Image: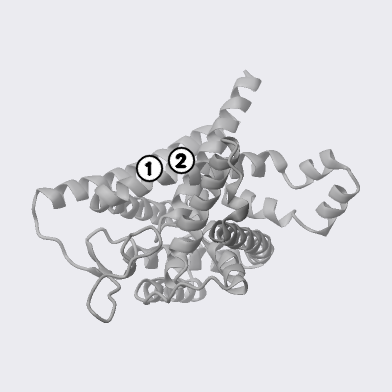
Amino acid sequence: MESTRTLADKIFLILKGLGMGAANKVPGVSGGVVAFVAGFYEEFIYSLKKVNSKAFKLLFNGRFKSFYRYINGRFLGLLFFGMIVSYFSVSKVLDYLLKHYELYVWSVFFGMIIGSIYYINKDFKDWNYRTYITLAVGILIGISISFLNPAKENDNLWFVFFCGIISVSGMTLPGFSGSFILILLGNYVLLLVDSVNALYDTFSNIFSGDFSLINNPERIRMLKVLGVFTLGSVTGLVTFSHLLSYILKHYKSITLSAIIGFIIGSLGVVWPWKKTIFKLNESGGFILDSTGEKVIKNYKRFIPELNTETYYAVGFILLGILIVLALEWYGQKTRKVK
């Protein structure tokens, strides 16, 4: 029975990683919200905090088992495995759904964020003037970010490294979408589409015995960009985790109220009813990225008319809320069993 439960825990942890990976890739949605709702946010932050000088000392001394136990390797390994698989599978499905059923996908996300606000708020009792102020500040920051205009694409490696640091904010700070920040920085397509596709194509070529990529400067450039971005992401992940673990330990109520504010503010980003505004060149034509897709400038939000499509969208919002409530119910059931 114990081994079965352990296997179920492992599978569920991989599924959590899949959820975080998919959420991190969708602009406006935060993987940290998935961690919060699924009940492993604090363990995630404190496990990342263990990636420190002591951990590297154990690693360099060849004490691999001690290193693995010290950083909670089973937890982090399965979680990150799920995230990596998500980037090459679940996120591809999401890309397809966003392209063909955009309104309904955003409606589900909108509902999930509403459910997340309920989930986090229901157990939070420490409301006072300080937590109300940080709640308001969090809401204002979240709303302000949603109305900023994107910058131009920039493949300077120092800037790419900075983008990596910023992009993981969505994993460590619920309600703060790292992928949406990448859109604002102008590098979403470069770092989460083009470079990932370059890595996928590279693996495909190598497995088929084709090593022509060494003579492909564009491919090498994209792999270099991806490598620097990954290094920045790891740096940001470890740095943010140390900072957040300290804040959670000493200012937990203020931190939670700010997180609730961020999540409420992010509702503006995932509002389902919006028209996409694309970037135009001087002659009035659409600017295309390297994949041939139109480059997004911003979104124009509107109040929908009451019609069949709107009723379906409202139904998907309710589905999103139910998904979060189901996750909460499963989490409570699991904790009782343990």
How packed mark 2 is, by other alpha carbons closer than 10 Å (few <14, some 14-19, many 20 or more), is: some
**Quarter of the figure that contains the N terminus:** top right
Give percent across and percent down for residue 220: 60, 58
Disc 2 secondary structure class: loop
Instruction: Assess whether mark 1 and mark 2 are in contact (beta carbons under 8 angstroms).
Output: yes
Q: Nearer the viewer, residue 189 or 203?
A: 203
Give percent across and percent down for residue 104: 25, 49
Q: How is the image coloured?
A: one colour
Disc 2 residue type (three-letter): Ser
Question: Given the current orientation, which residue lies at the most extreme top position?
Answer: 1
Q: Which mark is residue 133?
A: none
Residue at the disc numbered 1: 93
Disc 1 residue type (three-letter): Val
**Quarter of the figure that contains the C terminus:** top right
Q: At 31% from the left edge and 46% from the top edge, which residue is drawn?
A: 97
Visible residue check, residue 123: no
Give percent across and percent down for residue 123: 48, 53
How packed mark 1 is, by other alpha carbons closer than 10 Å (few <14, some 14-19, many 20 or more), is: some
In this rendering, the answer to whether 76 lies above or below 230 is above
Q: At 51% from the left edge and 46% from the top edge, which residue is drawn?
A: 201
Q: Which mark is residue 89?
A: 2
Q: CA distance from mark 2 to mark 1?
A: 7 Å
Visible residue check, residue 133: yes
Q: Is residue 281 left or right of residue 145?
A: left
Disc 1 secondary structure class: helix
Q: At 33% from the left edge and 46% from the top edge, which residue is drawn?
A: 96
Q: Nearer the viewer, residue 196 or 149?
A: 196
In this rendering, the answer to whether 115 lies above or below 205 is below
Give percent across and percent down for residue 60: 87, 50
